[in-house]
Image (cartoon, rainbow, N blue to C red):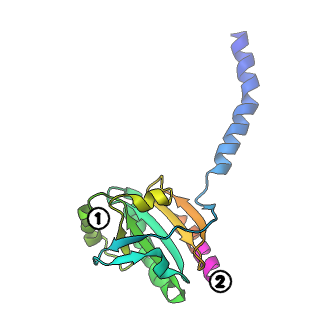
Amino acid sequence: MNNEYRLVKLMRPVLFILTVMLVSSVSASEEVSGKASDFSLMNKKGVKESLSDHLGEVVMVNFWASWCAPCRQEMPILEDLQKKYQRLGFTILGVNVEAESDKAREMLKEIPVSLPVLFDTDNVVSELMGVDAMPTTILIDRNGNKRFLHRGYKPGYEDHYEQQIRSLIRE
């Protein structure tokens, strides 16, 4: 018992430091850098669309799936952002990552959006962009550089999106 007490007492500072490190590393977004890899995918109208078609614009690439509850929650918010900032040179590319696009199309009937929706049925683009969470959102500046990365979605992330969009539009 005495040895256990000493061990616990010795471990407290280590546990505290690890907890602080863990909490400080969790954030709604992280800054990233480097050129965004160009890609081309079929959109919901059956037309091939590329990231490079939007060079000169601020682009948000949002990877999503119909089975992802946070994706469903976020979709109307993305639509609002698209409408609000589109006239300022901003667009959102919604990239669905499911092998079969039928469920995504059904979801889009439930949650209609005007933003471009692309289908990455072979997960080539999601692998190219290093997607490891649903949803994953990447903000790209007018020069085609990745600037911000968001993994997941929780209410309030849209405040970060909006600050970052405004900042990139002003550049």
Q: Is residue 115 above or below residue 36?
A: below
Q: What segment is highlighted magenta in the picture?
A: 163-170
Q: Percent position (x, y) of residue 158?
A: 52, 69
Quarter occupied by residue 76: bottom left
Q: Is residue 112 visible?
A: yes
* Identity of the residue drawn at 28% across and 76% down: 46
Separation of residues labelled 2 and 1 (CA atoms)? 34 Å
Q: Secondary structure at mark 2?
A: helix
Q: Residue 34 lies in what quarter of the image?
A: bottom right
Residue sitting nearer the eye, 73 or 87: 87
Numbered label tally: 2
- State whether the magenta stretch is mostly helix, strand or loop: helix
The quadrant the N terminus occupies is top right
Disc on res. 170: 2
Picture residue at 43% right of the left edge, 56% below the top: 134
Between 71 and 105, the one nearer to me in the picture: 105
> Is residue 104 part of the magenta span, yes or no?
no
Question: Dot 1, crowdedness within 10 Å: few (<14), some or many (≥20)?
Answer: many
Q: What residue is rendered at 45% in x and 67% in y?
A: 62
Which residue is at 72% across, 19% downward? 7
Lower position in the chain sequence, tag 2 or tag 1: 1
Vertical arrangement, residue 6 with respect to residue 102, above or below: above
* Amino acid residing under circle 2: Arg
Residue 104 on image: x %, y %: 29, 64
The amino acid type of the residue labelled 1 equals Ala
Image quadrant in which the C terminus is located: bottom right
- Name the residue carrying label 1: 104
Residue 45, percent from left and from top: 28, 78
Label placed on residue 90: none
Depth order, front residue of 29/52: 52
Position of 51 with respect to 119 (left or right) is: right
